[in-house]
Image (spheres, grey):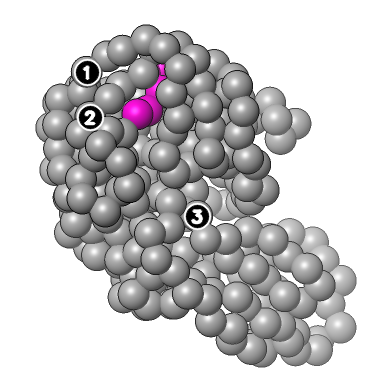
Amino acid sequence: MFITVCRLTLHDFLFYASREMGRLYETEKYLHNYGLTYALGLARSPYANLAQAPRYQADLERVNEQGVYVTPASPLHYTFAFHTFKMANVNYYNFTPQISNNQAVFGRAKELAPESSFAFFVLSEREVVLPSWVRLGKWMAKARVEVLAREQAQVKTGSYRVPGALNPLDVGSMPDNCNIVAMAPASLITNAYYTGQYYEIAAPSGFGGRTLCLPAEMSYQPERYARSSA
């Protein structure tokens, strides 16, 4: 199994609604692996989605068949910015029935600022070519993707700690201990401790350790997302 260590650096303001508190729309400091997989071009969705429902099961299952998996991205360095916006009604393209009073909507968005950087991992059965530039979030923010290291991982068994964030729906076993990051479409976990089989590679400079460990059994499990949303 190859593990590619990547760094993503924002060149624009990144916004997506992790939490909505009244008229404040907050962006989390982690990047979900579902959206990151689409941004890297590994998963593709139709240009138009008239059903207005996610297609994770159909889209991500194809990535599983290719033997590729992308972890969530964890912040290396980040800052936030606040922007106030005014948005008119957009009922002409929204198929969801709703009551409109023809008044403009005001709100504030908490966004990740340019030069914020994140680390994520790509697990693959063979070497994969990743784009150097991607677009992310509601406003299609531009971001730079750099490959820091690519190694063939060793498989070990025992207790280990995972650096960064994981999608618990995609891991084959439950962690011994972890912290939860509540965000859509499925919550992530950080500072996770596991016991079992894991992949180990040498850590690039700046990762605060000699080795990096990741669970050996990770794949997209969109059917778990569907069950948790039902």
The one of 59 and 221 positioned closer to us in this rendering:
221
Answer with left or right where residue 127 lies relative to residue 173: left
- Which three-letter amino acid code belongs to the residue tagged 2? Ile
Q: Quadrant of residue 114?
A: bottom left
Q: Position of residue 170 (x, y in %)?
A: 50, 27
Q: Are marks 1 and 3 in contact (CB under 8 Å)?
A: no
- Foreground pick, 19 / 119: 119
Residue at position x 58%, y 66% in the image: 27
Closer to us: mark 1 or mark 3?
A: 1
Label 1: how many Cα within 10 Å (few below 14, some 14–19, many 20+) = some
Q: In percent of the image, x 65 and y 41: which residue is there?
A: 180
| Quadrant occupied by the N terminus | top left
Closer to the N terminus: mark 3 or mark 2?
A: 3
Mark 1 lies on residue: 154
| x then y, percent, for residue 102 | 81, 87
Q: Is residue 61 visible?
A: no
Q: Is residue 76 magenta?
A: no
Q: Is residue 71 left or right of residue 228?
A: left
Q: Which residues are magenta?
A: 213-217
Look at mark 2 in the image and give the residue it sits on: 201
Residue, disc 3: 30
Work out whether residue 146 can be spotted. yes
**Label 3 residue SS:** loop
Counting the numbered discs, the total is 3
Q: Between disc 1 and disc 3, whose residue precedes?
A: 3
Question: Which kind of residue does numbered mark 3 sit on?
Answer: Tyr
CA distance separating discs 3 and 2: 23 Å
Helix, strand or loop at mark 2: strand
Mark 1 or mark 2: whose residue is earlier in sequence: 1
Contact? badges 1 and 2 (CB < 8 Å) = yes
Cα distance between the residues tagged 1 and 2: 7 Å
Residue 16 rendering spot, x and y as whole percentages: 55, 64
